[in-house]
Structures are given as C-alpha cells and as structure tokens.
Image: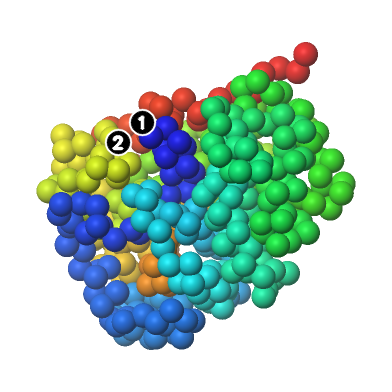
Amino acid sequence: MIALLKSFYSNPDERLDMSTHTTKHASAPGRRNFLLAAGSLAAAPLAGDALAQAGASSGAPARAAAGMRRKLGTLEVSSIGLGVQNMSRTYQTTVPSRPEMLNIIRAAHERGLTFYDAAEAYGPHEVERILGEGVAPFRNEIVIATKFGWNIDLETGKRLPGLNSRPAHIRQAVEGMLKRLRTDRIDLLYQHRVDPQVPIEDVAGAVQDLMKQGKVLHWGLSEMGLQTLRRAHAALPVSAVQSEYSMLWRGPEQNVIPTCRELGIGFVPWSPLGVGFLTGAIDANTRFAEGDIRRIESRFAPSNLSHNLALLDLLGHWAQRKGATPAQLALAWLMAQQPWIVPIPGTTQMAHMVENLGADAVRFTSAELAELDRAVREIQVRGARLPDAVQVYSDVEAPARS
C-alpha cells in the first residue's frame, strides 16, 4: 500500500473512468456533453481533430494554441504539459492499452504540447519506456521531465524502502533513464522527494556534473522544504518546483509560490484537477472502491465531501459563464495565477487530453479573475490532502553539509 501511495501521489491520472471505481458518480453535464460531442474516438490523431470541432460547436474550447509557451526559469515549454504517470498502470491496477497511450502522447504533440512529465518511480521504469517510444519521432521538438529520488533497484525496478539521493545513485539512475527514454539528455531532472540523509548541496553537485556531461539540461525539486529550495538554488540554479496545487489544494500559495517568484523559479502543479474532483465527476453520494486512493483521503470522506462540493458548484457556474468545461476552467485558473505556472494534468484517455488542452483558450479579464479568486478562497476545503504515510515525505528539509 505504501508503495502504491508513493507512486500515485506524484502525478496522478486525473481523469480515470469514475464508473470503474466508484459506486456512484456525479452528473457533470459540461464534461459529458463535451465528450459525447466527440463521438467515438479512434486511436489516432484524427480523433483529436474531430473532438476539436465538436468542442467548438458546444462552446467548449478544445484545440490548444500551438504558439502558447511559458518559461520555467529559462526553459521554454508549452503552457500545459502531459503527465504520463499512469500510462503503465492506473492506481486501481488497470493496465491501459499501450498503443493507445502512444497515440495520446503523439496526438498531444500534434496539438502543440511540448512538455511531458515522467519519473523512474512510475512503473517503476515502465512509464519512461512508454514515453521514450512515444516521443521518439519528434524527440528534438519537446521537453522531457523525469525524476529520481525513491530507493528503486536500478536493474530490476523493485521498490526498496525509503529514499536514495546519494550522488553515485543519481548518476546511475540517470544512465538508466537515458536508455529507457531513448535520448541523450534529460531536459528537466527533478529530485522527486528530499532525502533526509543527503545534503542538498551534494545532490546539486551530482546534477551539475551531469550537466557538464550534457546529460541533464535543467533541474528542479518536488515537495521540498523551503530552506532546502533556497540552498539548492544557491548551489545550482533551479528551473522548476513541482508540487500539488489546484483549487482543491492551495497550500503552495502561502510560501512556495512566493519563494518561486522571488527566485525566478517556474512552478509545475501536479494533480491540477484535484485527483479528478475538479472535473465534476463526483457528488455527495460517491463512494470510492477498494484500491482507490481517495478512499483513504479525509477530504473525500463523506463527512467532508458534502461541504467541499461547494467548490464544484462554483466551478460549474464559472465554467458555464466562460463556455468551458469544469476541468478547463480549473486549469485556466491555475495558469492565470502566474505566467510561469505550467500544470501537467495526467490522463489515459484521448478525449480528456484534448479537453485539457482546451484550457489554453480560456481567458479571464482582470476583474473576472479577482472575482473568481475571492470566491475560491472563501471556500475552506475540509480534510487533509494526503494520507499521513505520504505526507511525511513532503516539506522535508535536507541535512546540513558537514
């Protein structure tokens, strides 16, 4: 169970088929109409074009603007990325169709997406293989992000206890990543979680050595403590921070995002759709099946869920107002917070990938954004964002260098 939690809470698939793991799901007219308008999606990029036309006719922007770009530090990426974590196995242990995952990866690129997010822990190893195969035809046109840090056997991919950011392990881990990703460099390499046994300066030194060899171009941290971020940036300029952030969890607004602004670091929200909550596919009667991580999250407990649904009511109102789906509105709100915020919604469904990219077309006036911000922050979400067994790996400070 702990291994499953560690893997999922890094970039969960946002848009799983709710009917496969809940006893009841909410009605979400905007999202359903959007998907129904698409018809039956083929496993080819042509499906994306059909969906774009359907989305336009229903008032829901569907086609991403290929020219929309943002910068994470000095690294230029598309304004929305694609999290591929569950393309080897969803967190209910469902195995997606590999050919379809490759089609989604390639269709995303054809629609202007250039930013793909993976990790050695996803699979483990298998997601990097899928991504490497998927982007091989256009590798030089896109940005690959991946992560090290969990204690994973470098040969077998077996999960071992705890974390491992020892410099020698990092170097060996990157060699494996390069092979699985079919590439000669990693555009953005994150430390997945801070290792409490290894000074961050030692981690930065190992990454810097890899940069000198041309094997890594940029680096970042995920779910780190604030002082560790500052020390890391002082040792080797950090391009991006990746942490959970959405309308459902706004914790980074307190300290992390202001620190990124101060230091000129980009911010990449994982779980930008609130583990599927912000798609509108959950209601007060939803009960999660065994194996679904949300079953043990207190924010989705029945006692808290009915209260937290006020956020969905707000989201639905604004989605209708802006002619978008709830998911598109939630992603657009994130991007409107700062020009250097790049969400990476994950999915294993072509329709959801296309819908997510449609968020790039949603715009707010300054008055609208101020109004929406006030409304979002007036809703106090009840319940914890993570189970305790996972939360202990976040906000960790690296030890001082002796």
Q: Nearer the viewer, residue 38 or 330?
A: 38
Q: Position of residue 94 (x, y in %)?
A: 36, 56
Vertical side of 109 occupied by 89: above or below: above
According to the picture, the residue beneath numbered tag 1 turns out to be: 387
Residue 321 shown left or right of residue 230 in the figure: left
Pointers 2 and 1 in contact (CB under 8 A)?
A: yes
Q: Nearer the viewer, residue 244 or 351?
A: 351
State the residue at coordinates (34%, 49%): 92
Q: Position of residue 270 (x, y in %)?
A: 48, 48
| Three-letter code for the amino acid on which mark 1 is drawn | Pro
Sequence-wise, which precedes: disc 2 or disc 1? Answer: 2
Residue 332 shown left or right of residue 37 in the figure: right
State the residue at coordinates (76%, 32%): 167
Q: Nearer the viewer, residue 24 or 51?
A: 24
Q: Residue furthest front?
A: 156
- Where on the picture, by quarter, is residue 142? bottom right
